[in-house]
Amino acid sequence: MKPETLNFFDKVYEVAKQIPYGRVTSYGAISNYLGAARSARMVGYAMNGSGGKDVPAHRVVNRKGLLTGKHHFDGTNLMQQLLESEGVKVIDNQIQDLDTVFWDPNEIL
């Protein structure tokens, strides 16, 4: 599908699918990359609705590295477990060493 024919959620999913294993990005970084700087919340809505679309939504956190979307995952700690299985350290719903594991689509794509 050509990028100009994708809706906003589909564009979000295309970016999220490129987040490397063991890395995270933020809702705001994705919205900035898509040229919609004030649409971080819409990126969150897209991640919430991404079930079944093969999107690694667990790799998208808030700008401070908090697992603010964790309540949208089945189970109490699934988001954290998925991140930890990729080697991302999480303590009290907070990504540790965020600067090290942060992936910025503006710098990479």
Image: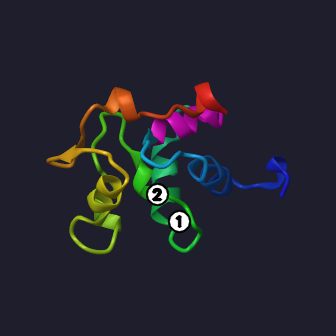
- Would you name the residue on which mark 1 appears? 50
Please state the horizontal and vertical placement of residue 43, each as a whole percent of the image.
Answer: 51, 49
Q: In the shown orientation, is residue 23 left or right of residue 72? A: right
Give the mark nearer the N terminus: 1 vs 2. Answer: 1
Magenta stretch contains residue 29:
yes
Label 2's element? helix
Kindly identify which residue carries mark 2. Answer: 57
Most common secondary structure along the magenta stretch: helix
Give the residue at x 14% y 48%.
92
Label 2 sits on what residue type? Ala
Task: Work out whether residue 98 or residue 41 is closer to the camera in this orientation and state it.
Answer: 98
- At horizontal 59% and vertical 69% (from top left) the residue drawn is 53
Q: Is residue 35 magenta?
A: yes
User: CA–CA distance between discs 1 and 2?
Assistant: 7 Å
- In which quadrant is the C terminus drawn? top right
What is the magenta range? 27-36
Dot 1 and dot 2 residues touching (CB under 8 Å) = yes
Left or right of 66: which side holds 52?
right
